[in-house]
């Protein structure tokens, strides 16, 4: 399962049908269709996300994004079985049945009762080319996914004589990237069980709303002097007082401005190379994600960045209390810092990554949004991060539910954002190897910088796989331009 732009998905054309969610008690605003919403409040992640959507809509400057997943179903589609499978999926995960409302300053999360929901099957259009189909889906997701409107996701399928492609696209407020393998696993297993005339048997999936409630109970009342913020304060102090770790290479962006995005993906290692890379990491007492992060740090340094790597890293919070099978936004963003200065070999940088990761994980319980609100209130009031931020994400898809059938199901995931002011990179390991997906600002400087960085990183991880070391300097012309320098200064030419 790879994450890459929807525009790169070569799905076969066919007839598109959609499943539209409806509350039988009336409109979603009808309280008779609601469960017991007393005391249900959104998580810190959800509250901030919703607030940004509200403020940007009020300023006629909408912020838009979505997360989507597709997967293949072999043979002639049993529409009735798939309808029941999708409905069971929505009913199972309380967060998908929620409408969000601002009440007395807080964001209420009001779930609709599961048995009040139905799905209507709606034929849409038949497409005879993959290009036209991708264009339709891209526009459909942009138009249908709205943080301020219920429902917060869309579902459909592309039907063909011998196979179908099922798609679901979500607003981030109800899910995260690791929710996507859960979606595929649950819907496929329910569909197959229903076709066999069997009961759907899935493991427990506690509600994300319970997670949010526990999180708010523990951290809503803390203040900036709370000792649990010590890790954040030390990180900020070492960064010269800045809450956000800057992306250290030139992207050619102006302050307080958002830009259209470039969304691109490419392979870094094939399956055999990824296995050898993992062995090289294990040989120095590290894990593969640590090796990728070490390679990223060295490439940024060689391109003119600092010797000490400072960045944000998303951390999955499902495993700490039994939410492994739950859909929701179970991600905390944490700062990580380690020494990758010149002269340090692979084993030394890996030891620094391991130590930095261990320190980060010992403080992972404090929610990112709460730390941001308390320690950087000026930046918290803005609708976006204040400048390009260094961000690293890694997922080993092989460890996700249903991974043993991904070759058959062919799942893919896709993220999209209307605008950005920096760069974010996601790395995925699956049975086919190691892959990279980056979203960054569409400027000439950013295209040159990211083109260099991606090629340099590919060469570096391959060197680690082949030799277990940073064997040689990066064999590309380096940007080596300090932040803030003129955009046209000392940058490598784009690849042909």
Image (cartoon, grey):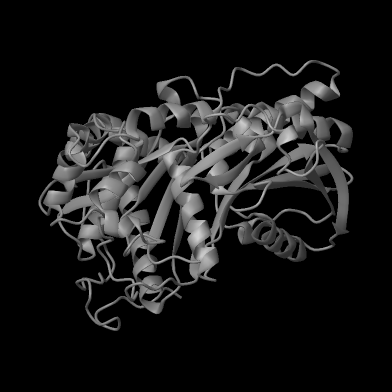
- Residue 448 lies, in percent from the top left, at 37, 73
Query: Which residue lies most toward the front here?
Result: 104
- Total labels: the figure holds 0
Q: Is residue 464 visible?
A: no
Q: Position of residue 229 (x, y in %)?
A: 21, 38
Image vertical order of residue 88 relative to residue 69, above or below: above
Vertical placement of residue 192 versus 457, above or below: above
Relative side of 156 to 484, left or right: right
Residue at coordinates 67% horizontally, 28% vertically from top-left? 35
Determine whether 176 is above or below 39 in the image.
below
Quadrant that contains the N terminus: top right
Residue at image point 34% right, 28% down: 218
Percent coordinates x, y for residue 71 in the rendering: 69, 41
Answer with the quarter of the image where residue 485 lies.
Answer: bottom left
The residue sitting at 63% across, 30% down in the picture is 93
Q: Nearer the viewer, residue 481 or 214?
A: 214
Judged from this view, the residue extending furthest toward the left is: 343
Q: Nearer the viewer, residue 296 or 202?
A: 202
Q: Nearer the viewer, residue 30 or 201?
A: 30
Q: Is residue 102 above or below residue 75?
A: below
Residue 36 rendering spot, x and y as whole percentages: 63, 26
């Amino acid at each position: 399962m790879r994450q890459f732009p929807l525009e790169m998905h070569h799905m076969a054309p066919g007839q598109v049908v959609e499943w539209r969610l409806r509350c039988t008690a009336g409109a979603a605003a009808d309280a008779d269709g609601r469960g017991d919403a007393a005391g249900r409040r959104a998580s810190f992640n959800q509250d901030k996300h919703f607030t940004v959507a509200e403020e940007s809509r009020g300023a006629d400057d909408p912020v838009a994004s979505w997360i989507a997943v597709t997967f293949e179903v072999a043979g002639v589609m049993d529409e009735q079985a798939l309808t029941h499978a999708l409905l069971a999926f929505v009913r199972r995960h309380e967060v998908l049945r929620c409408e969000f409302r601002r009440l007395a300053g807080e964001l209420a999360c009001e779930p609709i009762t599961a048995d009040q929901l139905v799905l209507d099957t709606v034929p849409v259009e038949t497409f005879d080319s993959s290009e036209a189909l991708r264009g339709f889906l891209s526009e459909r997701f942009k138009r249908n996914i709205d943080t301020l409107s219920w429902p917060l996701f869309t579902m459909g399928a592309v039907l063909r004589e011998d196979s179908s492609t099922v798609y679901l696209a979500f607003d981030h407020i109800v899910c995260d990237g690791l929710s996507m393998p859960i979606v595929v696993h649950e819907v496929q297993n329910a569909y197959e069980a229903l076709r066999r005339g069997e009961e759907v048997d899935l493991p427990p999936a506690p509600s994300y709303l319970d997670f949010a409630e526990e999180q708010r109970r523990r951290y809503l009342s803390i203040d900036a002097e709370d000792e649990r913020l010590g890790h954040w304060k030390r990180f900020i102090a070492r960064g010269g007082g800045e809450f956000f770790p800057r992306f250290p290479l030139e992207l050619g962006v102006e302050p307080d401005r958002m830009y259209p995005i470039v969304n691109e993906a490419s392979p870094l290692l094939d399956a055999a190379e990824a296995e050898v890379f993992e062995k090289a990491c294990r040989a120095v007492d590290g894990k593969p994600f640590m090796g990728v992060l070490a390679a990223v740090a060295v490439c940024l340094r060689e391109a003119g960045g600092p010797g000490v790597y400072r960045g944000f890293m998303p951390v999955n919070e499902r495993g700490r209390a039994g939410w492994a099978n739950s859909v929701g936004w179970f991600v905390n963003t944490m700062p990580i810092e380690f020494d990758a200065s010149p002269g340090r070999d692979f084993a030394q940088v890996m030891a620094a990554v391991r130590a930095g990761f261990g320190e980060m994980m010992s403080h992972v319980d404090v929610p990112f949004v709460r730390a941001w609100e308390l320690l950087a209130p000026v930046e918290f009031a803005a609708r976006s991060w204040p400048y390009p931020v260094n961000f690293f994400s890694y997922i080993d898809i092989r460890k996700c539910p249903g991974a043993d059938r991904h070759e058959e199901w062919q799942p893919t995931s896709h993220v999209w954002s209307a605008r950005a002011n920096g760069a974010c990179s996601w790395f995925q390991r699956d049975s086919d190897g190691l892959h990279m997906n980056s979203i960054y600002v569409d400027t000439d400087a950013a295209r040159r910088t990211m083109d260099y960085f991606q090629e340099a990183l590919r060469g570096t991880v391959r060197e680690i796989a082949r030799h277990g070391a940073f064997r040689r300097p990066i064999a590309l012309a380096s940007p080596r331009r300090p932040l803030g320098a003129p955009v046209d200064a000392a940058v490598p030419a784009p690849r042909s």
